[in-house]
């Protein structure tokens, strides 16, 4: 796409993104060892940024601001925001801002820290997701339901009911205790987390 072209309409952007995602998923499925080059150009592609912006703006968090005080739905000129953001990404000068930390209640009277990113950072995250998701989806198992498109916790529950009616007798529920409170969010800490984090498990008779 010519960088001097005007920003595509949402309809045009969605069609382009879908075409590219379909190709990425097809290549990843046909060749599990496929190495993808030049994905960064897709992250900064105007169509991907337009779709990402729409998802961020339309999300239920679209009225919530990060540390910069700018809520996505309050942005008067999305094109100006995306133009500046794309220029920073292409120049390799983009730096994410700290998240705004908010405590939200959990069951049992406990609280959990929620990090709210700025609108700009959310757009970059959404664009990365648009590029990477169709590639990784090719590797995920059909029994995996967490944070995947067109899959819900209710679908996992339905599969449990189905399996329980076909001779399966046990359900294993596992969780990593205080997952992101147990280590650094940097990659080395994340690797250690997988190996060392305490795991609690409950056995449920189906």
Image: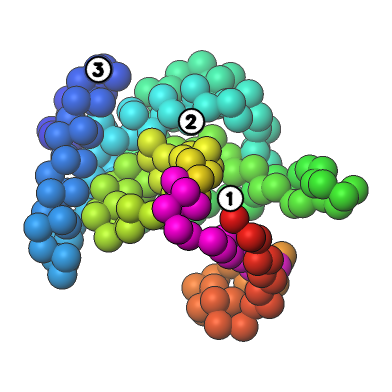
Asked if residue 173 is among those painted magenta in the image, a careful observer would answer: yes
Q: Nearer the viewer, mark 1 or mark 2?
A: 2
Query: In the structure shown, which secondary structural element does the residue marked by tag 2 occupy?
Result: helix
Q: Are marks 1 and 2 in contact (CB under 8 Å)?
A: no
Residue found at x 23% / y 45%: 42
The residue located at (25%, 17%) in the rendering is 11
Q: Earlier in the sequence, mark 3 or mark 1?
A: 3
Q: Horizontal placement of 26 versus 133: left or right?
A: left
Within 10 angstroms of label 1, few (less than 14), some, or many (20 or more) residues?
few
Q: Residues within 10 Å of mark 2 (few under 14, many from 20)?
A: many
Residue occupied by mark 2: 56
Where does the N terminus fall, quadrant-wise? top left
Question: What is the secondary structure assignment of the residue under circle 1?
Answer: loop
Q: Nearer the viewer, residue 20 or 199?
A: 199
Please provide percent x and percent y for residue 106.
80, 46
Q: Which segment is the magenta one?
A: 162-177
According to the picture, the residue beneath numbered tag 3 turns out to be 11
Vertical position of residue 74 compared to residue 40: above or below: above
Colour scheme: rainbow
Q: Is residue 13 left or right of residue 129?
A: left
- Disc ID at residue 180: none
- Quadrant in which the C terminus appears: bottom right
Find residue 84 and report its horizontal and vertical position in percent. Answer: 39, 36
Q: Are marks 2 and 3 in contact (CB under 8 Å)?
A: no
- Residue at which label 1 appears: 97
Q: Give the image location of residue 131, x and y in percent.
A: 28, 47
As helix, strand or loop, the secondary structure at mark 3 comes to: helix
Dot 3 alpha-carbon crowd within 10 angstroms: few under 14, some 14 to 19, many 20 or more: few
Q: Earlier in the sequence, mark 2 or mark 3?
A: 3
């Amino acid at each position: 796409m010519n960088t001097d072209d005007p920003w595509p309409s949402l309809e045009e952007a969605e069609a382009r993104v879908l075409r590219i995602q379909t190709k990425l998923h097809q290549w990843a499925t046909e060749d599990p060892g496929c190495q993808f080059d030049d994905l960064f150009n897709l992250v900064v592609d105007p169509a991907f940024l337009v779709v990402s912006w729409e998802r961020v703006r339309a999300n239920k968090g679209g009225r919530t601001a990060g540390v910069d005080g700018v809520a996505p739905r309050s942005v008067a000129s999305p094109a100006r925001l995306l133009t500046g953001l794309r220029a920073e990404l292409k120049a390799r000068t983009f730096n994410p801002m700290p998240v705004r930390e908010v405590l939200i209640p959990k069951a049992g009277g406990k609280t959990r820290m929620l990090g709210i990113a700025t609108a700009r950072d959310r757009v970059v995250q959404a664009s990365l997701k648009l590029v990477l998701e169709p590639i990784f989806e090719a590797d995920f198992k059909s029994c995996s339901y967490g944070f995947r498109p067109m899959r819900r916790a209710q679908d996992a529950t339905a599969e449990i009911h189905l399996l329980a009616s076909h001779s399966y007798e046990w359900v294993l529920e596992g969780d990593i205790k205080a997952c992101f409170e147990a280590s650094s969010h940097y990659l080395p800490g994340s690797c250690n987390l997988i190996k060392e984090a305490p795991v609690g498990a409950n056995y449920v008779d189906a």
